[in-house]
Every structure is written in structure tokens, then in C-alpha cells.
Amino acid sequence: MANLPQSFSIGVGSFGGGAGMPSSSSSAGAPPNKDRKMQFVEQLVLVLCDLNLRENALLELFKPDVDCGKLTDLSAADVSTEKLVRVAVRHRLYKCLSRDSAILDEKKKELFPDLGRLLWHSFGTIAALLQEIVSIYPGLSSPSLAPAQSNRVCNAIALLQSVASHPDTRKSFLNAKIPLYLYPFLNTTSKSTPFEYLRLASLGVICALVKVDDTEVISFLISTDIIPKCLCAMEMGCELSKTVATFIVQKILLDDVGLNYVCAISKSFFEVIQVLGNMVGALAEQPSSRLLKHIIRCYLRLSDNPRACQALKTFLPNMLRDNTFSSCLREDSMARNWLLQLLLNVNGSRVAPQAGGFDHML
């Protein structure tokens, strides 16, 4: 651990500190049941190092409560803290290794903000995650995929998202072209749950990259054809996948490089507005205010380009011009303002909402 930055040493301390995980003899005052549970977790983490036993260990560790009846005595085991932490973060087990059982997974960034750096700089960790990811590639051509396989790879992808979102590792993550390993999941067309989870997890990594305004990120994503992959997810994914994919396209368009790219090539522009138009039609039957908000923002940004704005005079869906979505947007003042600005950009001074339309919501 001497070679790790100090912040890593502090983070490791929260997992048990010192040169090694404490044994039962060194945990005086700890509740017996809690200490036995911790010993069982330690044993399972060690088992994770064995590729043949890893799957069963993961199943045990992700149970809501660990079965202490299966404990064996680990008091004599010589377990290094560094090894435990490396394996734990690789498999999202940091909450299991913590002494505070009340720690929630959604708080992991607050409790361990250096997770991305630890993953990136720990020897062999990224290679192990990529090994997990590529191992499922052969199964992507089959019509069905085992949920256990999908869940296991999704865990690896979720850890990559921590690296993609960390400011100190984002650029290295991009330079290593790690996102390309996720593109096969975005090319799948199956709507089954295992495929959908892989698609959504992969979109989550791309979303983490675009959340921070960075032209270098946008340029990389454009050069690797992320837009067609997002359009595919926008058309056939579940609502959450559609929402994340639309948000990614929105962030690309909000960058001048992205807007100019889409609007400079007729094929790209019409592919985008065709998918957006299809989604608007689908939302008329199954409304989603969150998804509609991102769609409107995409249209609004496109209207900032003179050529695109001229085309939208013809291709903007009529359902965005009338009162079709008035009830859907009733509680979202920002989305309403975006839509009114879009109509103003496209129609100029001829914007006149129909009776019962948006005028009564302002």
C-alpha cells in the first residue's frame, strides 16, 4: 500500500485498516454475530480469487443478509488489506467489507470518492474487468442470454463507470479507448432483460463521460460512431435506456462540435430527427415526461443551427405543435419553456398555441 496515494490509504482504512484485516481475536468488543459475519465475508472475498468459485461467492455476497451458519474459522488466515480491497472494489463488495453494515451502495461515491482511481491504478484490476466483459461476447449472437452471465458483466461495467466518472481517471480511460469494449452491447437488438441490462449498464458509462462538458470526450464519441448506437437504443430499448441514450445525444448536440457534426451531414441529421419523431409518436400513447423533456431539448438545440431550423419547419412533429402533451408537461416548467422556445425558433412570430394548449400552463 506504500505506493498508493494517501487518499487511497485513508479509503482502505475504512475497510478495516492496518496491514491486514482483523481476525476474531483482534476485534474485542465487536458483536459476536457481526464479527462472524465479517469473517464469512472475508472468506468469500478470498474465494473470488478463484475463477472457478467466483460465481457462487458473488451470489452469496450479494444476498441481503449473509448466512453466518456457513462460517469457517479464518482467525489464522493471513489476509492482506490491499488484496482484499482490490478484489472487493472489483466486485462491488466494498459495502460488505465495511465495519458499518448500514452503509448503502448508493452512498459509495460519498464514502469512497477515490474508487475510480483505486480501480485504475490497482495492478491487473482493469484487465480483470475487461476479461469479464469480453467473456460474454460469444453469447451476444444467441437469441437468449443467461441472467447470471448478464448480471456478472453488469457488475464489471458498473465499476468501469466509477473510473469514467472520476476526474483524475476520465482522460486515461478515454485514451485507452475502454468505451469501445462496451459498444458490442449497444449493437444488440434483443429486448430480453439480460440484454437490456447490458445495454443500460453500457449507456451508463457513456453517460458518465458526457455529464462533464468536455469537447475532447464528444469528439472521441463522435469518431467512434456512438450516435447511431444511441439512436438504436432510443428506438428499441426500455424507457430508461431510451432516456439515457437520448440524454447522451442531447449532451453531444449541446457541444458545438456535436451540433456541427450532426447538421453538416444530411444523413446524420435525418437519422436523428427520424428517431426523435418516432419517439414523439410513441410517447403520445405511453407518455413519459422525463423522456419527452430530453427529446424537446434535442429539438431545441437542433433549431440553433440555421439549416436544421429550416428543416424542422417541415419535420417537427405536429404533436409538439398542438396540445397533445399539455398534461404531460403540466408540472415541468423548464420543459414547457423549452418547447415554447422551440416553436418560436421554428415558426417565428407565428407561434399561437391552440385553445386548451400551452397558453393555460404559463
Image: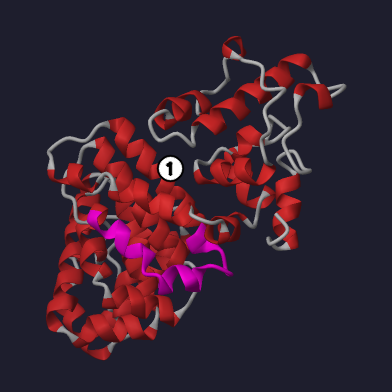
Q: Quarter-wise, where is residue 215 in the image?
A: bottom left
Image location (x, y in percent) of residue 95: 62, 37
Is residue 80 positioned above or below 42 on the image?
below
Image location (x, y in percent) of residue 292: 33, 57
Residue closest to the far bottom: 306
Task: Check disc 1: other Cα within 10 Å, few if <14, some if 14-19, many if 20+.
Answer: some
Nearer to us in this view, 1 or 326: 1
Q: Amino acid at mark 1?
A: Asn
Image location (x, y in percent) of residue 298: 32, 70
Nearer to us in this view, 314 or 119: 119
Is 168 colored magenta in this rendering?
yes
Nearer to us in this view, 135 or 208: 135
Q: Is residue 343 visible?
A: no
Is 248 colored magenta in this rendering?
no
Q: How many marks?
A: 1
Q: Is residue 119 visible?
A: yes
Q: Residue at x 20, y 70 (%)?
A: 272
Is residue 136 positioned above or below 175 on the image?
above
Is residue 316 positioned above or below 198 on the image?
below
Colour scheme shown: secondary structure
Residue closest to the far top: 69
Most common SS among magenta residues: helix
Nearer to us in this view, 66 or 269: 66
Check disc 1 and report the residue beneath it: 155
Q: Magenta span covers which residues?
A: 163-184
Is residue 136 positioned above or below 226 on the image?
above
Q: Residue at x 20, y 67 (%)?
A: 228
